[in-house]
Amino acid sequence: MKKISTIILLLVAITTIIYQQSKNTIKKELRDFAVAEIDKVQKIFFADRFNNEVLLTKQHGKWYVGEHLARENAIELLLNTMQKIEVKNPVAESMHNSVIKSLATNAVKVEVFTHDENTPFKTYYVGRESSDHLGSYMILENSNKAFVMHLPGSNGFLAPKYNIDGEKVHVDLWRERAIFQFKTNTIDTLQITHHQSEERNFSLIKTNESYHYQGEVKDVQTEVINTYMQLFENTYCEGFMNTYEKKDSIFASTPLHSISISANGINTTLHTYNKKPRQLHLDAESNPRKWDIDRMYAKLGDDLLLIQFRTFNPILYGPTHFAVEK
Amino acid sequence: MAIKKQTYGRLALNICILILVNVLASMLFFRIDLTTDKRHSLSDTSKDILQELDDIVYVKVYLEGEFPAGFTRLQNATHQLLNEFRSYSSFLEYEFINPSENTNQEERNNLYRQLYEQGLEPTNLQVQEKNGSSEQIIFPGAIIYYKGVNVSLNLLQGQFGTHHEVVLNNSIANLEYEFSNAFLKLFEQRKPRIAFIEGNEELSIAETIDITNSLGVEKGSLSEYYQVERFDIKEFTIDSVTQKASIQKQLETMTLFQAIIIAKPNTPFNNLDKFLIDQYIMQGGKVLWFIDGVAMDMDSLNNGNAFSMALPLQLNIDDMLFKYGVRVNADLVMDMQSDEIPVVTGYQGDRPQQGMFPWFYNPLVIPKNTHPISKNLDALRTTFVSTIDTVNTNSIKKTPLLFTSPYTKLVKSPHRVSLNILEREPKLDQYKAGEQMIAVMLEGKFSSVFENRINPINKKIPLLSKSEETKMIVVADGDIIKNHVSKSGNAYPLGYNPYNNQQYNGNKKFIINALNYLLGKEELLLIRSRELKLRLLDKNELANNRFFWQIINILTPLLFIAILGLVWTMNRKRKFST
């Protein structure tokens, strides 16, 4: 009996000492947002209040968003954030109720899965930015304690690191943005169509490991063609715009250009469309420009893309680009 | 079966007793501190501050990891103190963080940069390892969050010329004050108003910018505690009825300031100025005087002159100060413990060669007294400082605050200040004037300088001849509060010597402490006067009898356990032998 009493007393004493020695007074289960072993994460699920959902899965060492390949740098940023987020400060009690209400209505749910794919290893909610914009309100599932979380060393809030656009999540934000990734000499035919100036149309057809030019120009430079074909090795769009409400009307309009590529028996066609400028741009005669001079829309399969002239101007050169200088 | 029941009964009883004891302990909370210097006891001021907490205070202490013994002591002391704080307020939460934990160097550097920008000062440590030594950066500081705002707090206090163990000990002794002060800063909703007085060629906004708003990364300025304004004593509001300058209104405006700072005036005060300041004091106003005894500055020497005459500065306030209980003498202190200035020593081709020389007219004041205003302060940089004498005034308590080093020489003005003194070795036997008082605090009921005199201004304005209980501090150097401003207009931190990049933090802290004391935060400042005795190992004894003491340290606990075991066994034998 004495022994049991002694053991109980000892346990109480040890617990007290451990509590006294603890270097953090906030219970771990309330602030345990970080995922230490990030390599073990196999699946991440996001859901917003608009019923938008995003599922990131790791397959054979690569991350996918739905059936699409996910952007490596976005995944890297997300995992790094998940691993290193820390409590910036607990939410003040005077603000706690309003923050909880805000989290309940605006937050994005994040579920992190490791090996057991049916039960999330960790679930928390990412809310709006704190008043100083240096952290985000977050709360763990089944917790009643909200925190301002941040990434130590980084000045800013966390929503962009979780690819949260305002209060929404979307697959498009996670997708890999490569449009063309054709290795040299894998393209069999390439056709560029300028719908508003047909004289600029041309095509390049592979014959015996070199490309034969078909178009208005007679004498073309072979080296220029080879350099030109390298443009299709890594061509990126700025982003996907599948949630844009005018997507169908853009697709129904007449394209500016069409780029058709046939490689390994697969045909790929990209159509470009004019885009209205976001802000007022004036031309040389001080008239407002009708179309954006930096960006265009594009259609690739069923996707609406935002592309930049900076990337596509070299691809859409007219045939004179290939002509032998005289 | 019966024995089992009895056993469980006893267990239940013990558990109940344990719970009861805990409940009682939580109701009858008390602590006993058996240390002689009461190092584990909080002051009543701190307890009051903690009991006033109405929301979560979150303290992030960036002092975690492997440190040399001294820093581990600082870490443990901080930890203990925060636990003590928690005993008095459940709103206090804390976390210890190792900022060097991240293995990614870029991310680690980003965190260092962030902490530095937030006001934490890094410290380089040399850490001994198996294969030599390595350098470690630590941030001995904390950031305290409260209701969406935060303040940073450096736990390690820089003290020029002080042994690092003493610095650490002083830092530990000041922990309670620093934390309590930081809490107060966070809680204070409306800051008291104070003003720099203008009108007599006092220091400009640029020359007082650092003490007002803190230029450097290191925080600590008057605006953290007070609403700092500037008040031109010669600029009057015109009375709408009489269309005349309203002296009464001017006095009323002045009394809105809880303290005024008179920073290095250069032109004489007229009777009206003196009347306003005097009556402000008589109404209980607090004054911080930074007064030069002689007119002399380095610019006089920098303009191509090898010498300049230091003449008595006629400010026409001698009678005022005398009446209040002090006299700023028209002399200069030359101190062998001094700051350096650059002097051209020769030319290499067309290029001047400069050397740094100690300039005895710029004494470095290292406070040694135990008054909470100046205790444990870093060195203060002074320039052409004069001495102060106290005058016998019965109702006024006079507390000296700053002294020069003992190695001083006093020169009366007019005095020829020349750079030529740098060419000769100083004669040590001339520097034996001893410690000179250069700052003093006066507390009590002051008599007006206009007492028993005809009201010099306006008979309609009642003259108060005796003040309420109030305080003032007189410093015999205007430059203590002046930050350097370059010719191009760039302001440097207060106490900074741009020529040798040496920063003396004492100036700033002295001024802030002085104002805090004047404005009734003396209880908080009293925490600063706590003395924690540094119990260092006796180095001589250590060198001579190292092995002996090692053996004592190892064997004594073992011997103690062995004796305990022996007594225990003997007791059992005696008990069960019958």
Image: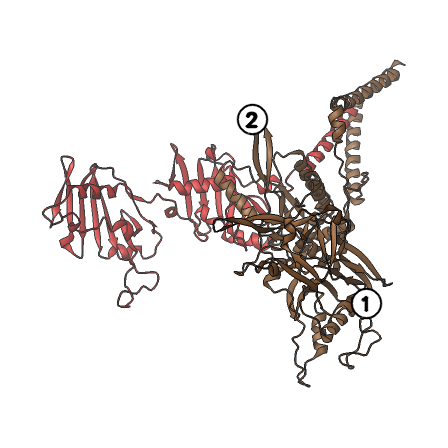
Residue A75, picture quadrant: top left
SS at badge 2: loop
Q: Which mark is residue B131?
A: 2
Label 2, label 1: how many angstroms apart (C-alpha)?
68 Å
Q: Could you say which chain is coloured red in the image?
A: A
SS at badge 1: helix
Q: Residues within 10 Å of mark 2 (few under 14, many from 20)?
A: few
Residue A246, picture quadrant: bottom left
Q: Chain of mark 1?
A: B
Extreme residue toward the right, this view: B578
Image coordinates for residue B312, horizontal then vertical, percent: 71, 64
Image coordinates for residue B455, horizontal then vertical, percent: 79, 78
On the rendered structure, is B132 left or right of B550? left
Q: Is residue B247 visible?
A: yes
Which residue type does callout 1 highlight?
Answer: Lys
Image quarter (top left, top right, bottom left or bottom right) of the C terminus of chain B: top right
On the rendered structure, is B516 left or right of A156? right
Which residue has dot 1 on it? B323
On the rendered structure, is B231 left or right of A249? right
Residue at x 76%, y 24% (from the top left corner) = B545
Q: Residues within 10 Å of mark 1 (few under 14, many from 20)?
A: some
Q: Nearer the viewer, residue A179 or B390?
A: B390
Q: Nearer the viewer, residue A86 or A45?
A: A86
Which residue type does callout 2 highlight?
Answer: Asn
Image coordinates for residue B83, horizontal then vertical, percent: 71, 42
Q: Nearer the viewer, residue B543 or B346?
A: B346
- The colour with which the image depicts chain B is brown
Mark 2 or 1: the one toward you: 1
